[in-house]
Amino acid sequence: MDTNGWKPGFDAVLDGVTAGDAAGRVPGVVAMVTDREANVYEGARGVRDMGTGAAMTTDTVFAIFSTTKAIGGTAVLQCVEEGLLDLDAPAKEYAPAIGELQVLDGFDADGTPRLRPPGSDITTRQLMLHTAGFGYDFFNQNYLRMASEHGQPSVVTASHASLMTPLLFDPGTRWEYGSNIDWAGQVVEGIRGRRLSEVLAERVFAPLGITDMAFTRTDDMKARTATVHARNADGSLTPLDFALPDNPQIDMAGHGLYGTVGEYMKFIRMWLNDGMGPHGPVLRPETVAMAVQNGLQPHQKVVMLPGVIPSLSNDAEFFPGLKKGWSYSFMVNEDEAPTGRPAGAIGWAGLANLFYWIDRQNGFGGFWATQILPFGDPVSFGGYLDFETAFYDRLRTTRAA
């Protein structure tokens, strides 16, 4: 397929979100599209840091936040393939500390948390599907209260203590987005007997040729890292002194990686190619086919994410009104999206307004990276949706020609 004529349309979207006054722009953005073989578009606009004016470039390093989840989930699926992990066995068989957690049943009049044993053991399948009972303090009022009144650490500390949160409900009873994949990473470490960083380097990054992605940045990666900016109430932008920890206590499979967009495209291509990387297989084709299917039960629904800490997240939802499921570990849109993304495609996002999609049906995927808080930033999220829409408009036009 001739994609040479696609560049102007994508460039126009990136130009649009990095032009004008601060309230209507992002500091900088990197966006790419790939087919099954290679990137068909690479673009970078704006700056890495509004304080220094350093240019955004395609080799800029981002804290990729929850776009880490699919990579951590891949390490889980490898354990299943090798017969080392039963997704429906109690997860405490592999990560014993998870068996210590109880369910939060509200608070007493004096603010003391009411805790009780869970109705059943958490399984790794539930962790992969976000039905185990975990949440995030920026999306859940009870976790926010645990943080503000009882010192529950944020997951961005990458500490063991931040994982030891009470459950919000009995395992398997509903869907709630949270720290599930961080725990799934602990399952992998229990099985492999190694840090997750080592497992990913050997079993995911090496066969994909990924070298510029890690939980701990090299000095070179630090020098290329984009600054996270805050979107203020008046729409202006302020650089923040914020970074995910290098040398973390826990390699957080749910949000802890740094990397470039180009490196993430190699991971997307693996999913477009039935698990095969340029230097060997990462997953078997049958595993990939299973992993992209909605795994939720009919009573479990993917719902809007309520922004209960306004500095970290707005209320956010992909494609409101569209039926969405969850796979291992991606969101699945069950109907065609307004952008043109077909039913059955997969994708997700990261807290600092990073977004991606993987369309195995058409053989394309894309990634949009900014570093802005709160999540669901109207300019970045809107720009991403315009970018994805521009892709499908051009795909349809090219095929019709």
Image: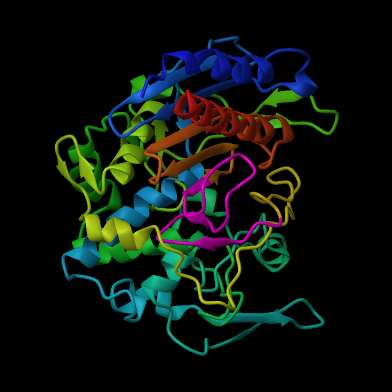
Residue 49: in sight, yes or no? no
Q: Position of residue 213 (x, y in %)?
A: 34, 34
Give the image quarter of residue 83: bottom left
Q: Position of residue 164 (x, y in %)?
A: 49, 68
Determine the main secondary structure of the stretch shown in magenta.
loop
Identify the residue shown where x is 33% and y is 27%.
Answer: 218
The magenta stretch is 321-348
* Residue 338 magenta-highlighted: yes
Residue 26: in sight, yes or no? yes
Nearest to the observer: residue 246 or residue 359: 359
* Residue 222 magenta-highlighted: no
Q: Position of residue 233 (x, y in %)?
A: 83, 34
Identify the residue shown where x is 67% and y is 51%.
Answer: 317
**Looking at the image, which residue sits at the far right?**
234
Nearest to the observer: residue 199 or residue 128: 128
Q: What is the total number of numbered labels drawn onto the structure image?
A: 0
Give the image quarter of residue 92: bottom left
Identify the residue shown where x is 24% and y is 67%.
Answer: 80
Q: Position of residue 171 (x, y in %)?
A: 51, 80
